[in-house]
Image (spheres, rainbow, N blue to C red):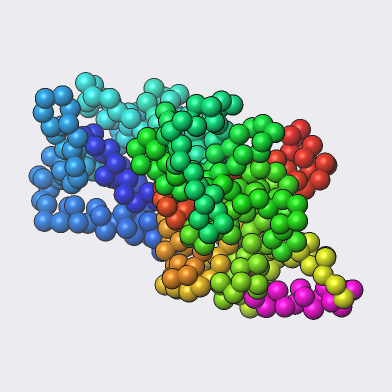
């Protein structure tokens, strides 16, 4: 139900499906939820695999299709899919009656251990409590790891790399520089260059404030461009970068060559404000986009408040408090007093559309600036469904904090946000930056560090 293609992810190992698992699939097949759709897909996979097989073939195990990796001198044999064909024996302690689905699965594992003493029986489940009970009963249990994009969230690509203090001394002899359309470029060669990604930021952590973005890579050489500075008077819709990472983010947000941007960071680092300022500048001032579309997963922080009346936009509005707060900040500097600010805010809101994720399937957005907020709560499949809505001239922004995941069964390593950061890494039209420093208030900064 978590990954419908899981049957094909175990290489040469045999898979045994207890009958109660098929019962659980049947009980959860109805509905329009992600889990129900996954269940129906799994059922179709199983139906295709057993099509035309007789009872003897099923008892012997059905070969699982797929590529089989090499193991030493020869090929590994393909794994087989087995189904439970005998009733469970009373192998569980009296404290765990076999009537519950979890306990029936455990009983099946104990039966397999008895029937195949030379094989290693492993229970694979996303259910932590089931794994705990299995370990107590002497059954080896593991989490499902194949959905992980990374082994550890600490390995997630950060989008920026600090250069060694002697960078210029070590690379000046093999460096070319030129100017083009008012922009400064360098061609650099060196040991670290092959590790750079396209659209990755590099900087010197000293008084020079050298900041550049990698534009091309070719073996041990790369073309880098000096990053635009959005500090001081060079503002975007009245917003300036307060630190290095925010300046990197604005460079990606304002770039015409970058179609997909991911911005990660804790609360208060400026993700939404920077994105909204860049969106308004390119929509209202430059006319590059027709409108701004903002959406997010509707996962409540506390208890659900229930049914919300109104249109799609009115139902989504309570979830978009961050949008309203940042719009207020962006219109504070407008002239004309209270009436002028209110008129400006109404004008801006007319160009910003709030949409629900539930109605995105099948749509195509042309010349839109799409902001996906709280993207850490999306699965990889949902993320793919959203990003593939982008048509010509559309830019997609994903904002989130992988340490604040509210969706059940998603972790830092399996989140859709982690997935797209890793998959789009190095693509010439995508960029990523992780914001480090909170800029909301001293109270918010202290709370983030201390609580």
Determine whether, in the image, residue 91 is placed left or right of residue 247. Answer: left
Q: Position of residue 401 (x, y in %)?
A: 61, 46
Determine whether, in the image, residue 52 is placed left or right of residue 427. Answer: left
Residue 199 in view, yes or no: no
| Residue at the image position 24 percent from the left and 37 percent from the top | 11
Q: Position of residue 449 (x, y in %)?
A: 74, 34
Region in magenta:
337-356
Q: Position of residue 355 (x, y in %)?
A: 58, 70
Q: Quadrant of residue 204?
A: top right
- Taking depth in this image into account, of 136 and 372 the one nearest to the observer is 372
Label the magenta part by its dominant secondary structure: helix
Determine whether, in the image, residue 157 is placed left or right of residue 79. Answer: right
Residue 443 in view, yes or no: yes
Determine whether, in the image, residue 398 is placed left or right of residue 54. Answer: right
| Residue at the image position 67 percent from the left and 31 percent from the top | 206
- Taking depth in this image into account, of 397 and 140 the one nearest to the observer is 397
| Residue at the image position 15 percent from the left and 43 percent from the top | 63
387 in the magenta segment: no
Q: Is residue 383 above or below residue 162?
A: below
Q: Quadrant of residue 285?
A: bottom right
């Amino acid at each position: 139900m978590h990954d419908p293609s899981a049957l094909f992810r175990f290489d040469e190992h045999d898979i045994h499906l207890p009958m109660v698992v098929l019962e659980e699939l049947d009980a959860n097949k109805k509905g329009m939820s992600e889990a129900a759709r996954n269940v129906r897909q799994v059922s179709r996979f199983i139906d295709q695999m057993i099509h035309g097989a007789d009872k003897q073939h099923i008892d012997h195990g059905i070969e699982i299709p797929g590529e089989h990796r090499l193991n030493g001198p020869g090929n590994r044999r393909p794994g087989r899919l087995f189904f439970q064909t005998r009733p469970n024996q009373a192998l569980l302690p009296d404290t765990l009656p076999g009537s519950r689905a979890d306990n029936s699965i455990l009983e099946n594992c104990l039966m397999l251990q008895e029937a195949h003493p030379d094989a290693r029986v492993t229970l694979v489940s996303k259910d932590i409590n089931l794994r705990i009970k299995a370990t107590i009963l002497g059954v080896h249990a593991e989490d499902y790891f194949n959905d992980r994009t990374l082994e550890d969230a600490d390995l997630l690509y950060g989008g920026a790399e600090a250069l060694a203090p002697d960078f210029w001394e070590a690379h000046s002899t093999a460096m070319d520089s030129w100017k083009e359309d008012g922009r400064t470029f360098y061609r650099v060669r060196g040991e670290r260059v092959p590790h750079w990604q396209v659209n990755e930021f590099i900087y010197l952590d000293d008084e020079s404030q050298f900041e550049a973005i990698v534009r091309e890579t070719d073996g041990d050489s790369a073309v880098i461009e000096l990053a635009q500075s959005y500090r001081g008077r060079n503002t975007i819709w009245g917003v300036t970068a307060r630190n290095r990472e925010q300046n990197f983010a604005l460079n990606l947000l304002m770039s015409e060559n970058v179609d997909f941007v991911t911005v990660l960071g804790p609360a208060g680092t400026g993700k939404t404000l920077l994105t909204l300022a860049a969106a308004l500048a390119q929509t209202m001032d430059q006319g590059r986009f027709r409108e701004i579309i903002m959406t997010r997963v509707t996962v409540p922080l506390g208890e659900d408040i229930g049914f919300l009346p109104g249109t799609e936009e009115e139902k989504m509005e309570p979830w978009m408090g961050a949008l309203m707060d940042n719009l207020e900040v962006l219109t504070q500097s407008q002239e004309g007093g209270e009436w002028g600010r209110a008129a400006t805010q109404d004008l801006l809101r007319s160009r910003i559309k709030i949409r629900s994720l539930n109605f995105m399937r099948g749509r195509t957005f042309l010349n839109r600036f799409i902001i996906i907020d709280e993207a850490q709560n999306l699965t990889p499949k949902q993320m793919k469904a959203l990003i593939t809505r982008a048509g010509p001239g559309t830019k997609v922004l994903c904002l989130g904090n992988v340490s604040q995941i509210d969706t059940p069964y998603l972790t830092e390593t399996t989140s859709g946000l982690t997935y797209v950061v890793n998959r789009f890494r190095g693509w010439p039209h995508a960029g990523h930056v992780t914001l480090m420093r909170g800029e909301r208030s001293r109270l918010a900064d202290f709370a983030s560090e201390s609580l």
